[in-house]
Image: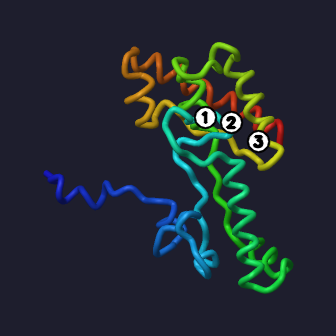
Amino acid sequence: MATTTTLQPLLKPITTRELLGFDKFIPSFSTTEGRDVLIGVNYASGGAGIRDETGKELGGRINPNRQLQNHKATFSSLIKLLGTRESSANYLNKCLYFVAMGSNDYLNNYFVPGYYKTSRLYTPEQYRDCTIMEQLKRVALRGLGPLGSIPYTFSNICRNNVATTCVANINSAAPIFLCQTCAAC
């Protein structure tokens, strides 16, 4: 019989960084200086969503509008490093951009009726439409994964409810978002 110690290497989660073969994590925008931008920049902000108000109750977060401004600042830094706008654009065209968004708009907004009124104003389909239209002007969206299996859901949203009913309700929002996203793109 295997012990926890012998199983531990098998249970280690694989990060996106490891899957892509990067030796180190990509540094955050706030800590990137000089030539560091040549290895990559992480603009992510935990708790932020497509909608500017999403995650407001969690404290400081960087909304997508600010993240895009930070990317513009990175582009300016690249121009200084590489010499021309064209060479910087060519460099960025070879980069991998990984963007995951939308989950927080449900978990840190729609399903938090004590702080946000969105679930009282909109059905999940209407909320999806409003949220997608807000962001489609800036980026293409791929959709959401199952929201009910995220640990945050269990510990914060479903803790006082019957878990299976609550998770099913939350998971039902993801395909609605995905179907509209695919149709809109």
Between the residue at mark 2 and the residue at mark 1, the CA separation in whole angstroms equals 5 Å
Residue 174, position in %: x, y? Answer: 62, 31
The residue pinned by badge 1 equals 54
Categorize mark 3 by other alpha carbons within 10 Å: few (<14), some (14-19), many (20+).
Answer: some
The structure residue drawn at horizontal position 37% and vertical position 22%, both measured from the top left corner, is 159
First along the sequence among labels 3 and 2: 2
Side (left or right) of 91 relative to 111: right
Who's the residue at 56% across and 35% down the image?
56
**Colour scheme in use:** rainbow
- Quadrant into which the C terminus falls: top right
Q: Quadrant of residue 171?
A: top right
- Measure the C-alpha gap from mark 1 to mark 3: 13 Å
Density class for disc 2 (Cα within 10 Å; few <14, some 14-19, many ≥20) is some
154 vs 143: above or below: above
The residue that disc 3 covers is 135
Whether residue 2 sits left or right of residue 69 in the image: it is left
- Residue 51's disc is 2
The secondary element bearing badge 3 is classed as helix
Residues at badges 2 and 1 in contact (C-beta under 8 Å)?
A: yes
- Secondary structure at badge 2 equals loop
Q: Amino acid at mark 1?
A: Thr
Q: Secondary structure at mark 1?
A: loop
17 with respect to 4 (left or right): right
Q: Residue at x 55, y 36 (%)?
A: 55
- Residue 107 coordinates in the image, percent (x, y): 54, 31
Q: Nearer the viewer, mark 1 or mark 3?
A: 1
Between 154 and 49, the one nearer to me in the picture: 49
Residue 124 figure quarter: top right
Disc 3 to disc 2, how far (Cα)?
8 Å
Which of label 3 and label 2 is nearer to you?
2
Indicate the position of residue 112 as horizontal and vertical percent values: 53, 23
Q: Amino acid at mark 2?
A: Arg
